Image (spheres, rainbow, N blue to C red):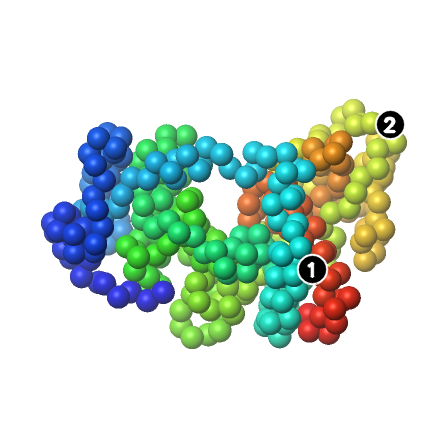
């Protein structure tokens, strides 16, 4: 997504820039006072550290618009849904079929990513399927609007999103991205894998070796970056992800149970077994050793489902800090792999 409007960064009069860009300024009555004050403070505090002149950064921020719909979306996240509803959002025939097609189309590339980072093709495919429906839905919100709205007018996480706004402006210069035109999610995540700007800067890789890390238009960079992200967050090559947990006598005393929020795998299977928690390893390629560590998870489906999440499950939750998300990735990946085998796609996927 190369820059096509560098002059945006040198125009001092914000209203004139908005008009030239065909953007309507928001009505003053619709903009919270905190948003305007936050924008002014951001310019004053961040211009030097971001490498902008103060007038230059002020002109850029004058093009940002407060979006109440972004605030509303943040207040009703998917992860607030119960598992049975969350699962239905992503485990659909259309998304499974799309995953099989994506797996076949990028089979060679996915093999190379697996060789480099140890992450199976179906896991990476499922993440892209959940994040952007295999690149079909990259987000319709201007990143500048999303991050400024949340950074200046969403007190609960204002510090985080204000920092991400700074990361986005650094990223725009590093990767030749137009900061005004770039679009993403309502939370400011960008590209096919929906990386937040700080993750883009830290974990994106130039897997096609063309000199840029392009998470919008380069499948190689996209898939390589997802593999690198998981590897950097502890993915273990060939390791299990999760297995159903069988409870001998109900939830055991003294064993923490993680629900929607993730927990690192700290209990050995031997200790869990002694406490009455047994791993059903039928879906795993091999039974894990007794000293393998896991976390006990509880998902509110049709009745509570208990699972054991291993290190690779926890690595997926570093992508999105939700057990529901990681379980959706796991189940979608299994459905995609199974469908690929029955349709002959296993040869393509490897």
Question: Going 69% across and 59% down the picture, which residue do you hit?
Answer: 336
Q: Residue at x 51, y 55 (%)?
A: 132
Vertical placement of residue 275 versus 101, above or below? above
Element type at mark 1: helix
Between the C-alphas of marks 1 and 2, the distance is 34 Å
Q: Position of residue 169 (x, y in %)?
A: 31, 53
Q: Residue furthest top?
A: 253
Q: Are marks 1 and 2 in contact (CB under 8 Å)?
A: no
Q: On the rendered image, what quadrant is the N terminus found in?
A: bottom left
Position of residue 271 relative to residue 315, above or below, is: above
In the rendered image, residue 168, in percent from the top left (x then y), is placed at 35, 52
From the image, tell me which residue sits under label 1: 336
Q: From this viewpoint, is residue 159 visible?
A: no
Which quarter of the rendering shows the C terminus?
Answer: bottom right
Determine whether, in the image, residue 261 is placed left or right of residue 146.
right
Where residue 93 sits in the image (x, y, percent)? 67, 55
How many marks the image carries: the answer is: 2
Residue 156 bears which disc, if any? none
The residue that disc 2 covers is 249
Toward the viewer: 93 or 337? Answer: 93
Residue drawn 34% across and 56% down? 182
């Amino acid at each position: 997504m190369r820059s096509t409007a560098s002059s945006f960064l040198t125009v001092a009069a914000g209203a004139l820039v908005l008009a030239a860009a065909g953007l309507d300024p928001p009505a003053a009555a619709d903009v919270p006072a905190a948003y305007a004050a936050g924008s002014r403070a951001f310019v004053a505090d961040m211009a030097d550290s971001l490498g902008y002149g103060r007038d230059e950064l002020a002109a850029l921020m004058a093009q940002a618009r407060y979006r109440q719909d972004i605030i509303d979306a943040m207040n009703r996240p998917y992860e607030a849904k119960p598992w049975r509803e969350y699962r239905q959002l992503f485990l659909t025939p259309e998304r499974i079929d799309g995953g099989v097609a994506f797996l076949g189309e990028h089979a060679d590339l996915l093999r190379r990513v697996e060789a480099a980072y140890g992450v199976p093709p179906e896991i990476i495919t499922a993440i892209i399927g959940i994040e952007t429906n295999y690149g079909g839905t990259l987000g319709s919100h201007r990143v500048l609007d999303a991050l400024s709205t949340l950074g200046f007018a969403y007190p609960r996480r204002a510090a985080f999103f204000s920092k991400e706004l700074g990361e986005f402006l650094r990223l725009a210069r590093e990767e030749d991205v137009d900061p005004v035109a770039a679009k993403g999610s309502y939370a400011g995540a960008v590209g096919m894998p929906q990386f937040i700007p700080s993750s883009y800067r830290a974990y994106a890789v130039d897997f096609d070796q063309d000199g840029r890390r392009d998470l919008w238009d380069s499948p190689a960079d996209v898939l390589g970056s997802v593999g690198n992200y998981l590897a950097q967050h502890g993915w273990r090559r060939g390791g299990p992800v999760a297995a159903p947990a069988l409870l001998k006598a109900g939830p055991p005393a003294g064993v923490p149970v993680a629900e929607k929020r993730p927990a690192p795998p700290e209990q050995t299977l031997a200790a869990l077994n002694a406490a009455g928690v047994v791993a059903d390893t039928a879906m795993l390629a091999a039974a894990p050793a007794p000293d393998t560590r896991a976390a006990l998870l509880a998902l509110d489906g049709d009745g509570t489902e208990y699972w054991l999440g291993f290190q690779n499950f926890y690595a997926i939750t570093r992508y999105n800090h939700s057990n529901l998300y990681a379980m959706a990735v796991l189940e979608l990946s299994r459905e995609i792999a199974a469908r690929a085998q029955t349709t002959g796609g296993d040869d393509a996927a490897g």
